[in-house]
Image (cartoon, rainbow, N blue to C red):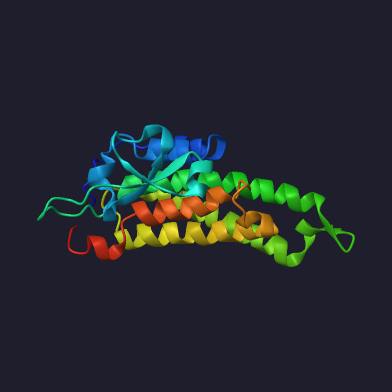
Amino acid sequence: MSSSPSAAVDLNRCRDLGREQGLAVGLAAALAGLDPAREAPGGVAVLPAAHLPEGISVLPHPLAAREGLALVRFPPPRPGAEQAPGLTGTRAAALAAVRIGVLDRLLDAAIERLRVRRFGGQPIIDRQLVSGTVADVAVEIELAVAAAAAAEADTPAELTWSGHERLTEAGWSVARLFGAEGFTAAHPARALHLSALVADLWVAQPSATEGKR
């Protein structure tokens, strides 16, 4: 299991924060009560820029800065100290809920965009390939909501990691719905790219937790 302290997690609140206030605010809620320097696997993490520990080393990352986040590096652990495996169980579920909220908001924005844009006299949203992508993402969101709600402290890291990977794939699908705009720093879809980075740096990978449960 993760060394992260178990805490009561309000998944609905985390999802609402991700949707209404953004990734940085949601991440702050998902990490509340943790010591990032002790819990971040690999010594590098994304943190809300408004809640950085004093003296922390901030690495340049233009996308993160635009979203109220910071990419940080922690000092290496003492010799012999066990490296933190990262977030699992309810903490990883809280982060998933935040990511679902971000995905919700941007999927809605993409649908609205596609309803007003036309191709061949037809709203783009009505094209089979586009509507199929939207439906697939909606299904992934519902599956992720159910998985987050079912997560417990001893949820296998394999399931936790694969769930976050599926959210990342759904995020790429939504980014593509915005066309080229979805891959520019100035577009709100940057939150999807950062959401994937946050998961990569925070969520425990299966190999990091084998033999620890």
Nearer-the-camera pick, 144 or 42: 42
What residue is drawn where x is 38% and y is 40%? 30
Residue at 29% x, 63% y is: 206
Camera-side residue of 39 and 114? 39
Where residue 195 appears, as percent x and y from the top left, is: 48, 51
In the image, farthest residue toward the left: 80
Residue 108 at what x, y percent from top left? 66, 46
Left/right of residue 69 with respect to residue 103 in the rendered view: left
Q: Is residue 2 above or below residue 55?
A: below
Looking at the image, can residue 149 be seen?
Answer: no
Compared with 21, 179 (above or below) is below
Q: Nearer the viewer, residue 83 or 65?
A: 65
User: Looking at the rendering, in which quadrant would you find the C terminus?
Assistant: bottom left
* Residue at the right extreme, as displayed: 121
Q: Is residue 147 left or right of residue 39?
A: right
Residue 189 coordinates in the image, percent (x, y):
60, 50
Name the residue at 19% across, 54% down. 83
Residue 143, x across and y down, in percent:
49, 55
Residue 58 located left or right of residue 185: left
Q: Is residue 66 visible?
A: yes
Quarter of the figure with residue 155: bottom left
Q: Residue at x 46, y 49 (%)?
A: 61
Report the number of numbered marks: 0
